[in-house]
Image (spheres, grey):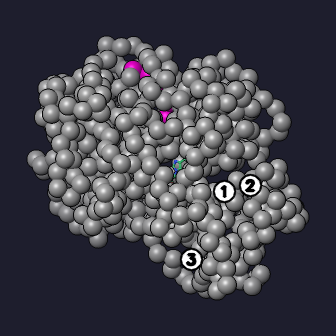
Amino acid sequence: MNLEIKYWQKKTSLIDWDKKPKTIFEKKNNNKFEWYGDGRLNVAFNCLENKQNNNKIAIYFIDKNYNVHSYTFKQLSILVDKFAYIIKKNIKTKKKSNIIIHSSASIESAVSMLACAKLGYPHSVIFENLSSKSVLLRIQLLKPSLIITRADKKQFKKDIVPALEEYKDKNLTIFSFSNHLIKYSKVFNISIKQLEKINSTKTLYNSFKSNHVLFTLFTSGSTGIPKGIIHSSGGYLLYSKYTCIKQFGMNENTTVLTASDAGWINGHTYALYGPLSIGATTVLIEKPIILLNQKFLIKIINELNISILYLPVTLIRMLKSISQKNILKTESLKTLGSMGEPLAPSVGKWYSNFFNLKNKAIINTYFQTETAGIISSPKYNQTSNDAPHGCVGKPVNRFIKVKLISSLDNNQSKNKIIKISNLWPGCMIDVLNGLEQWKNYWDDLGRFNLFDLAKYDLKKNINIHGRIDDVINIRGHRIGSEEIESIILKNPNIAESCAVPILDKLEGNRIIIFLVLKNKKLINFDQINKLIFNYFGSYALPKKIYILSELPKTRSGKILRRLLKQIIENPKKNDYGDMSTIINPNIIKEVKKALIVNE
Ligand code: AMP
């Protein structure tokens, strides 16, 4: 057994197995593989049942009206047990088919996910507010036996009913957790309060093979059509727990607020499965945007004793843009994390100053839906000197062999393509209906391609500079979108920025910049040009700069650069392909108008 396999064998002790695995790793055809293949476990047992007599808080749920609801491990375990009982009683198929959970982060999504895990039904959490067309597409792909939704009456009628009428499956059952009574055939109305009162027999858990599917999750779709990424039970849970401990330093005394939607990978790994399996307290937040209310933010950090605050970069930028120069002093907060997008050093610096943690590293977590958990980030016990704000630190351990590889068309470029030359237990196990897509992830040498650009700093920390699709190539200089954007963000009057390439006959590409201004204060574009000129040189000067009220974003807060690029190329078009995950579709009109007016 080589050192790497021995290492991951040792880590099996992190998990409660019903049958401890003897086979640690097996490679199959088509770059497929199995971690802990002969091991058996139940994920819900690991998150709840082994702590079922624990009166410690497992979940604080902050609803959109700022109310905080708390659930101990014992209460949560009972709720999950009862919901599992109801699922079992009402589901019409015996097969362990998919269950769709249509909800933002909430106590209902957590109970549903854990009940599915307990029964061994793979779940797929889809974003609330997806259009009926996008809901239908996901139903057609997943062929679920059950849909669980928190949609209210209006939303149910608008987004779910048309999808159900089109899909027409006799065996499909629907559970509604809405506050309204939904009257529609096959809908079973239930609430958490009713669930608490239900008399049910204990639902015993079964154990499942390590590679049993725990969930399918669609990617954010910032660069293309969202893909359904499939994750295992054993490898996934082990890697979630392991990275919570190793990167964030989580333990039973931790309270973590991971401000992620349930339909995003962070909402699975670092808001639910990871923290609960450790016995930590997790704070779920229905609408992360309410954290922009600083009085409320400081109040919940203090009252809930939050020790780890883990925010999407987009929310950090918004907080920065509305904040005055004050510093929030809290007793409990020890660690800051950031997720989802590159963290510009100026924004990172502000974030750590604002929370009075300026000498500590920010756990800027680099990962994807496909990787399940962190591939590279600073660690909780590092300083900002070891891992400067903005970098994603070093790979989680020496067995995650991250390689930065020169692209063929430009060996000189400092920006490299980031790949991983071996496998880790959290790696996805399949892509929904997508063997061809699966094959795309691996190169001829069997290395996993993350499709991002990266560079090392002098201390060998990694800096991510955006997606390969967003690379800007001017006269042979390859610049990541993030590099330009983070330089622009040095201007204190700019809240958000986005750099997009357009084709140019002479130069290859030219840059178009979109800006969102802080406090709507007008700026002189010469200031932006000067920043870019000083850092890159004249070749990178933008062809045009546009001001927008906001940038188009996905529901997980990622800037939709692909959409901006498409609108620039054809501002008069009506259809820009799959827009299922855009959160602010109205912005499309504004971008088109800005481009046409300034043509
Ligand atoms: P998704 O899996 O769809 O949520 O998106 C994953 C992508 O988000 C990655 O491939 C990166 O492009 C980007 N990303 C995630 N975390 C970071 C980070 N810490 N820094 C820079 N980019 C990130």
Taking depth in this image into account, of 474 and 105 the one nearest to the observer is 474
Asked if ligand 1 lies within 8 A of label 1, the reply is: no
Q: Do the residues labelled 2 and 1 touch (CB within 8 Å)?
A: yes
The residue pinned by badge 1 equals 483
Query: Measuring 20% from the left and 25% from the top, which residue is drawn there?
Result: 17
Please determine whether, in this image, residue 383 is positioned above or below residue 211.
Answer: above
Element type at mark 2: helix
Percent of width and height locating residue 206: 14, 31
Taking depth in this image into account, of 124 and 452 the one nearest to the observer is 452
Mark 3 vs 1, N-terminal side: 1
Does 282 appear in magenta? yes
Element type at mark 3: helix
Q: Main secondary structure of the magenta part?
A: strand
Type of the residue with mark 3: Gln
Q: Residue 487 carries which label?
A: 2
- Would residue 389 appear left or right of 426 to someone viewing this image? right
Span colored in magenta: 279-284
Q: Which dot, 2 or 3, sits closer to the camera?
A: 2
Say if residue 156 shows up in the picture: yes
Type of the residue with mark 2: Ile
Q: Rounded to the nearest whole Å, what is the CA distance between mark 2 and mark 1?
A: 6 Å
Does 151 appear in magenta? no
Element type at mark 1: helix
The residue pinned by badge 3 equals 566
Type of the residue with mark 1: Glu
